[in-house]
Amino acid sequence: MKNYHDVIIIGAGPIGSYTAYLLSKKGFNVGIFEKNLSIGKNINCTGIISEKCYKKIGIKEDILVRSVYSIKAYSPSGNHISYYSSEPIAYIIDRMKFDIYMNEMANGEGAKTYLNANVEKIRTDGSSFKIVANINNECREFRSKIGVIATGYCIDSVYRSLYKRRTHYFGIQAKGVIDNLDSIEVYFGNQIAPGSFGWLAPYKGSEVMVGLIVKDDPIRYLKRFLKEPLISHRIHVKEKSIKCSLLPIGMNVKTYGDRVLVVGEAAAQVKTTTGGGIYFGMLCSEIAVNTIIKAFERTDFSENLLKEYQVMWLKKIGPELKAGKVIRSIFSRLSDKQIDILMDIAKRDGFLPMIRNMDFDWHRDAIFYIIKNIISKGLSNF
């Protein structure tokens, strides 16, 4: 049937396209519905990924912007700790090219992408997952056995029921120009980003990404950050480049239902420490695909079977999300003076060896190390 797919995926971001790619490789008829006119529009992401993520996808060279070998962390007073590596500790990619590449991978395996396709209605019944999509100003109904919501964190009325009791932050970022920035720089302090952090990340040539994650008033905090003495004399930012979006922090209440699964940022499958979502989203996408395959094998698309997806992805990344929430809760209560003390302790007591052994994607062990060996020592000074 013309308007039928085995699986309908809403959202052609990297996680939606990756899910479609994996399913199409298994022979499923997959339709991807993207509300924008083209892939990779309106992205608010620094594009920092780990080596494991880089190798998992097999990213083409023209998508790679640069390798990162060093990182610096600054306390409110300007005191800092630096780490340099002989091997890349992270990679920065062109997110627009990356999203296009992921979608091309899916289409190459037989998935069909509908652009300018705004999904206006979603419903399920005993036999199908149904959507009404406005495609180029024409409303059309599509059906499938199961649907996957991969819209990113979206609070449009169609998806609002997914976001009850959710905590979110604002991620705000702009492009700027700085000469000779090679390190990722991370800045802490209540005047910069209370309970969170700001950053400078090298991009193409002298271009840099400057941004922060905050719970409220993102524009005010970004403007204040840009006036910080450590960066104000180094950077020029065009206000037209500023992008701001909601970032879910914490675990979603429910990421499954009859004939539907939710993946990626839409399911809050992002690092509660840094807000990065690509690697965790891909891991959870693989779990979703395995669950969908099982549903087709058993001809059972009920909520009772699909809840296995949430059990499995929480088992995979849930401990990381919980650890990240703990460290965020602790930092949200620290004064700038206390943050300065912790930075001094980290410099004195050998935090650098821990960084060398730290996994870029999995932060739980590092968080426990910080709590036990840095924060606990700092308590006597507070």
Image (cartoon, rainbow, N blue to C red):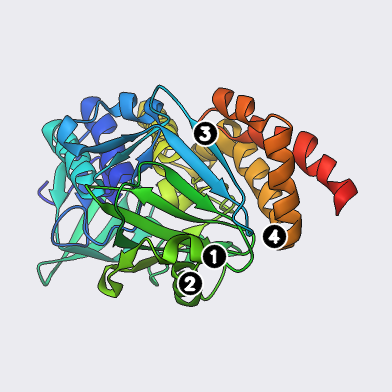
Q: Nearer the viewer, residue 190 or 268?
A: 190
From this viewpoint, is residue 5 visible? no
From this view, report whether residue 28 is shown above or below residue 156: above
Instruction: Write down the residue under mark 1.
Output: 214
Q: Which amino acid, by three-letter code, is at mark 1?
A: Val
Q: Residue at x 50, y 67 (%)?
A: 228
Q: CA distance from mark 1 to mark 2?
A: 6 Å
- Residue 356 lies in quadrant: top right
Contact check, label 4 and label 2, Cβ < 8 Å: no
Q: Residue at x 22, y 31 (%)?
A: 24
Q: Residue at x 15, y 48 (%)?
A: 113
Residue 37: % across, % down: 13, 62
Instruction: Tell me which numbered mark, 3 or 4, is placed earlier along the sequence.
Output: 3
Q: CA distance from mark 3 to mark 4?
A: 25 Å
Instruction: Write down the residue under mark 3.
Output: 83
Question: Regarding mark 2 in the picture, which secondary structure is present there?
Answer: helix
Q: Nearer the viewer, mark 3 or mark 4?
A: 3
Instruction: Tell me which numbered mark, 3 or 1, is placed earlier along the sequence.
Output: 3
Residue 137: % across, % down: 11, 72
Contact check, label 3 and label 4, Cβ < 8 Å: no
Contact check, label 1 and label 2, Cβ < 8 Å: yes
From this viewpoint, is residue 2 visible? yes
Question: Regarding mark 1 in the picture, which secondary structure is present there?
Answer: strand
Instruction: Write down the residue under mark 2.
Output: 218
Q: CA distance from mark 1 to mark 4?
A: 11 Å
Name the quadrant of the C terminus: bottom right
Instruction: Tell me which numbered mark, 4 or 2, is placed earlier along the sequence.
Output: 2
In the drawing, what numbered circle is on residue 332?
Answer: 4
